[in-house]
Image (cartoon, rainbow, N blue to C red):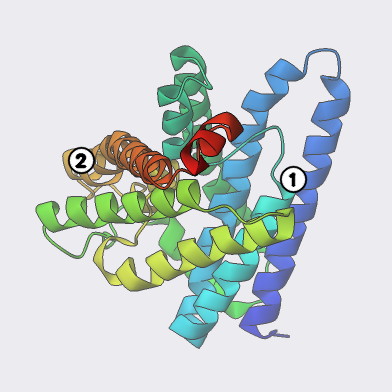
């Protein structure tokens, strides 16, 4: 007996979320004497959870269209933010940003990025396995596409346009995240999700709009006919090279705001303000 696609998707994502939660809990218990190791394992689990949900999201896109796909992504991204722990991000650009601002060593950053890629690659055999036993006919039909050696690339534009799209998406996302962060975990998660969903829907037909090398490695580089050079240039070099530009731009904004406050006398000490009044 077949089930509605939305129900099949919900069941798979819910099962994956719960499974990842218990794996995290077990690892925290196992490594309670050395939680430093856990932060690396958390990147594998979080990226695994992200990729599994994104692969499943294609079912919603194909069956219900862009609007409901956007709703699905919004709910899914919020759930990710609320379940990630161990300071995991499942985003290679976020790790690179932490390295540049010296919140993370280079060696630690490289290791985390490699583990993110590993987590993303592990998600594909996992999804294939679940789809094999899924009650949803759509899943069983889509399973064959995950076994294909040749498939259509998500890069639908030229190489230069693809690099520009991924770079712009990365710039907008991280700039908005560093310039404004709502108070409260729920509001912050919702703000993060809204930004991501908006960017993804705008550029979905161009590059798939990843702005996350770890995610792109899982979703766009699983077929033999995807050129390695194109993949690395569009989905790795372009977004990673954009992160220093975000820092530079944000630093200029901070300096401009500081000069503006100083010119308005907002940063003057109480003694300096009294002298001005006299």
Residue at 58%, 69% in the rendered image: 74
Q: Write down the residue under mark 2.
A: 233
> Is 97 rendered above or below residue 188?
above
State the quadrant of the N terminus: bottom right
Packing grade of label 2 (10 A; few <14, some 14-19, many >=20) is some
* In the image, residue 229 above or below residue 139: above
Depth check, front residue: 56 or 270: 270
Find the distance from the CA under tag 2 to the CA under tag 1: 32 Å
Q: Are marks 2 and 1 in contact (CB under 8 Å)?
A: no
Horizontal side of 249 relative to 264 (left or right) equals: left
Q: Which percent across, then down, holds residue 90?
A: 54, 41
Horizontal side, residue 73 vs residue 12: left or right: left
Return the residue nearer the eye: 135 or 154: 154
Q: Quadrant of residue 37?
A: top right
User: Where in the figure is residue 212, as x and y percent of width and height?
Assistant: 41, 46
Residue at (40, 24) in percent of width and height: 100
Residue 138, image x and y in percent?
55, 77
Callout 2 secondary element:
helix
Which residue, given by chain and number where applicable, does mark 1 sit on? 20
Helix, strand or loop status at disc 1: helix
Which residue is at 47% across, 39% downward? 276
Instruction: Confirm whether residue 16 shows in the render.
Output: no
Callout 1 environment at 10 Å: few (<14), some (14 to 19), or many (20+)? some
Q: In the figure, is residue 65 to the left or right of 25?
A: left
Q: Which mark is residue 144?
A: none
Tag in front: 2 or 1: 2
**Residue 52 percent coordinates (x, y):** 58, 54
Report if residue 166 is visible in the image.
Answer: yes
Chain-order first, disc 2 or disc 1: 1
Residue drawn where x is 38% and y is 54% of the image: 210
Q: How many numbered dots are placed on residues in this image?
A: 2
């Amino acid at each position: 007996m077949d089930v509605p696609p939305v129900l099949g998707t919900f069941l798979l994502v819910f099962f994956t979320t719960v499974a990842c939660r218990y794996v995290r809990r077990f690892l925290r218990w196992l490594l309670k004497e050395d939680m430093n190791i856990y932060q690396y394992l958390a990147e594998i689990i979080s990226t695994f959870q992200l990729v599994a949900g994104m692969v499943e999201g294609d079912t919603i896109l194909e069956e219900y269209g862009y609007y409901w796909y956007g709703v699905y992504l919004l709910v899914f991204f919020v759930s990710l933010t609320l379940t990630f722990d161990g300071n995991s991000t499942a985003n290679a650009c976020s790790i690179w940003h932490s390295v540049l601002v010296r919140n993370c060593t280079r060696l630690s950053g490289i290791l985390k990025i490699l583990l993110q890629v590993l987590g993303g690659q592990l998600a594909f055999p996992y999804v294939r396995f679940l789809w094999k036993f899924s009650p949803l006919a759509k899943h069983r039909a889509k399973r064959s596409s995950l076994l294909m050696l040749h498939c259509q690339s998500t890069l639908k534009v030229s190489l230069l346009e693809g690099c520009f799209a991924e770079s712009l998406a990365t710039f907008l996302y991280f700039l908005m995240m560093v310039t404004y962060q709502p108070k409260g975990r729920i509001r912050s998660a919702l703000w993060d999700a809204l930004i991501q969903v908006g960017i993804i829907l705008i550029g979905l037909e161009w590059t798939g709009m990843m702005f996350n090398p770890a995610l792109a490695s899982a979703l766009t580089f699983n077929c033999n006919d995807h050129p390695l050079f194109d993949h690395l240039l569009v989905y790795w070099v372009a977004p990673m090279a954009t992160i220093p530009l975000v820092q530079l731009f944000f630093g200029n904004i901070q300096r401009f705001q500081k000069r503006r406050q100083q010119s308005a006398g907002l940063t003057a000490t109480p003694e300096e303000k009294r002298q001005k009044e006299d």
